[in-house]
Image (spheres, grey):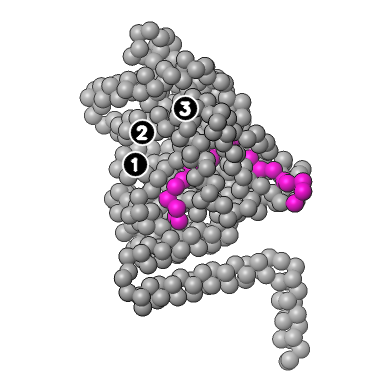
Amino acid sequence: MARRASKLASLAAAASGIYLYGNKFLDPNDFGVVRVGRAIATTAVITYDYLTSLRGVPYGSEEYDFLKSQVHLRSAERLRELCCANRGTFIKVGQHLGALDYLLPEEYTRTLKVLHSQAPQSTRQEIEQVIREDLGKEVLLLLVKQIFPDFEFMWLVEEAKKNLPLELDFLNEGRNAEKVAHMLKNFDFLKVPRIYWELSTKRVLLMEFMEGGQVNDRAYMERNGINVNEISRNLGKLYSEMIFVNGFVHCDPHPGNVLVKKCPASGKAHIILLDHGLYQVLSESFRMDYCRLWQALIKADMKRVQKYSRRLGAGNLYPLFACMLTARSWESVNRGIDRSPVSASEDVEIRSNAAAYLPQITQLLNNVPRQMLLLLKTNDLLRGIESALHTRASASSFLNMSRCCIRAVSTYQRSKSHSLYRRAQISLTEALSLWQINLYELFLWLKGSQLGNWVIALLSRMHHSTY
């Protein structure tokens, strides 16, 4: 177990270090070797700590669990210090890890969560240098690929080259903010800061000031009378609409970028969406395959799960792909992911498999369409929020996804049909499917409400009184 833990820590740190290695090292005018040295030293210390601290301790004993928790905490603090010292993209990696409550040990997520709201600030010179260094990543990773033929992280270069300039262009961020606000204007609970264009440039973005609690702060919501389940449900609605219906997706929903606040006037809870620099635009064919894959996953239709997973590049690794998308075990995927919440034993299985299948996960990430990479990151972050709020794998989230998938597929089918009769048939099928979902949702509400319990008790008494 110690060996597996150290292997996971080493691989995670090494992968991040390799990805970020080119940031400064190739520029002789900067002290990039210091950043690289920190990453290597941190990796070595974490690995040594796991190997030595747990050696000879009986697995499963109270002493083992205590020592393991201490090593997790020390390692997490070292990673946080590394992120704060090296800054830049290291902060992005740390923010992502801090949101993975459902996957990483609590010591890691609790320690790294501070990066969501207390990340070190960068100077203008440092930001500009990131752009100059972007090609350095490519040169170094090509060299690594030659030395280590099995290295499968070349896709990181392509994504970094494409996304980094967009994230640093504040005019692009402002346009994204206005686009998503208009696109989701029917959701009155969503608030996007207004952009002051007359005072904004490519390097400066002035927007409306908004404040609130982080979306994963359950205690804040309880103190302020905000319904946790409603927030989780509404966040799912937002992202289902973005992914399945519009194909324009905010891809950095870590808790520091998603705030919640109760409006004093109306008493309604608002979701505030910040940081609009990174969006993924989904092609129509990709979006339809992704819709149909999720429909198959929700219905536990394994033939269609295999079919659409393969179409999205998973190949023979489609079971692993399905598990990564749903964050559920293969057994739960086969049984139906909406049938039951995640159990403690399944949670342990998922965490263990993340380390055991790391080479296959790497291969899969190298094979899927580039559009999928940011969606997987987005899924991870949303899953972490659900885990923190204890609303993970709720039936309502799957119902909202189903609605959006049905609407998206029906709209696509109508656009491809030239027959008035066929379009009417598609619309009728869509209406019936949505009506079935509404009926099922009503059943779930009645089942969990006092009114529903009263009706069931009344019907039961009436039934017994007839005999």
- Where disc 2 sits, the SS reads helix
Residue linked to disc 1: 370
> Which disc, if any, is residue 202?
3
- Where disc 3 sits, the SS reads loop
The reply to whether the magenta stretch includes residue 254 is: yes
- Where disc 1 sits, the SS reads helix
First to last magenta residue range = 244-266
Which marked residue is nearer to the observer: mark 1 or mark 2?
2
Name which of mark 3 and mark 2 comes first in the sequence: 2
Q: Is residue 24 above or below residue 402?
A: above
Near mark 1 (Cα within 10 A), the count class, few <14, some 14-19 or many ≥20, is some
Amino acid type, mark 2: Lys
Pointers 1 and 2 in contact (CB under 8 A)? yes
Which quadrant of the view contains residue 187?
bottom right
Front position in the image: 55 or 46: 46
Pointers 1 and 3 in contact (CB under 8 A)? no
The reply to whether the magenta stretch includes residue 324 is: no
Residue 6: % across, % down: 45, 28
Q: Is residue 17 above or below residue 1?
A: above
Residue linked to disc 2: 162
User: Residue at the location (71% across, 86% down)?
Assistant: 463
Near mark 2 (Cα within 10 A), the count class, few <14, some 14-19 or many ≥20, is few
> Which disc, if any, is residue 177?
none
Front position in the image: 62 or 465: 465
Residue 198: % across, % down: 55, 31
User: Residue at the location (62% across, 45% down)?
Assistant: 191
User: Residue at the location (39% across, 41% down)?
Assistant: 373
Name which of mark 1 and mark 3 comes first in the sequence: 3
